[in-house]
Image (cartoon, rainbow, N blue to C red):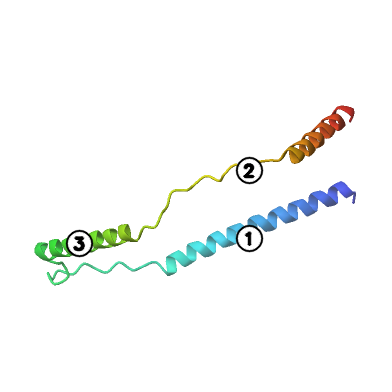
Amino acid sequence: MSILSQALWITALGMGLVFAALILLAGLMSLMTRMFRERVPSPVSTDSTHPSPDRERGEKARAAAIAVAVALAEQEQVTARPITPPQPIIVGAWQLGMRTRQMTQKGEMKRRG
């Protein structure tokens, strides 16, 4: 068996294992969704399960009032401040000279190489 044929067999075996694992995982996920799917209750003909329109409006109004109260409370707690940009760093003459010299040396090295 040549090295090339061994490499092809190893590649095929690896790819086969990967695809087999993917198919197994997809099957397990499908099985789990079927097992743990929420059961839809059968419709009941009594009116006790359906809230009256007046009660439903009252609940919506209460929910809206709570949402407004929460939003107002959050507005009072906002502590955001504008971001101040950092002050520019003043470079001394000696440091500027050293940096210029380093950049010049790097430029000469690139031209030579």
Question: In screen coordinates, is 97 left or right of 41?
Answer: right
Say which residue appears at 53% left-offset and 61% top-offset. Answer: 27
Q: Secondary structure at mark 3?
A: helix
Observer-side mark, 2 or 1, equals 2
Say which residue appears at 64% left-offset and 58% top-offset. Answer: 20
Question: In screen coordinates, is 113 left or right of 61?
Answer: right
Tag 1: amino acid:
Ala
Q: Quadrant of the C terminus?
A: top right
Marks 1/3: CA distance?
A: 52 Å
Tag 3: amino acid:
Ala
Q: Which residue is mark 1?
A: 21
Q: Could you say which disc has been placed on residue 105 in the image?
A: none
Lower sequence index among marks 2 and 1: 1
Rendering quarter of residue 42: bottom left
Observer-side mark, 3 or 2, equals 2
Lower sequence index among marks 1 and 3: 1
Rendering quarter of residue 19: bottom right
- Give residue 7's position: percent from left, percent from top: 82, 50
Q: Which residue is mark 2?
A: 89
Q: Secondary structure at mark 2?
A: loop
- Give residue 57's position: percent from left, percent from top: 13, 61
Of residues 63 and 34, the one nearer the viewer is: 63
Of residues 83 and 23, the one nearer the viewer is: 83
Tag 2: amino acid:
Ile
Of residues 57 and 12, the one nearer the viewer is: 57
Q: Residues within 10 Å of mark 3 (few under 14, many from 20)?
A: few
Q: Residues within 10 Å of mark 2 (few under 14, many from 20)?
A: few
Q: Which residue is mark 3?
A: 65
Say which residue appears at 54% left-offset and 59% top-offset. Answer: 26
Observer-side mark, 1 or 3, equals 3
Q: Secondary structure at mark 1?
A: helix
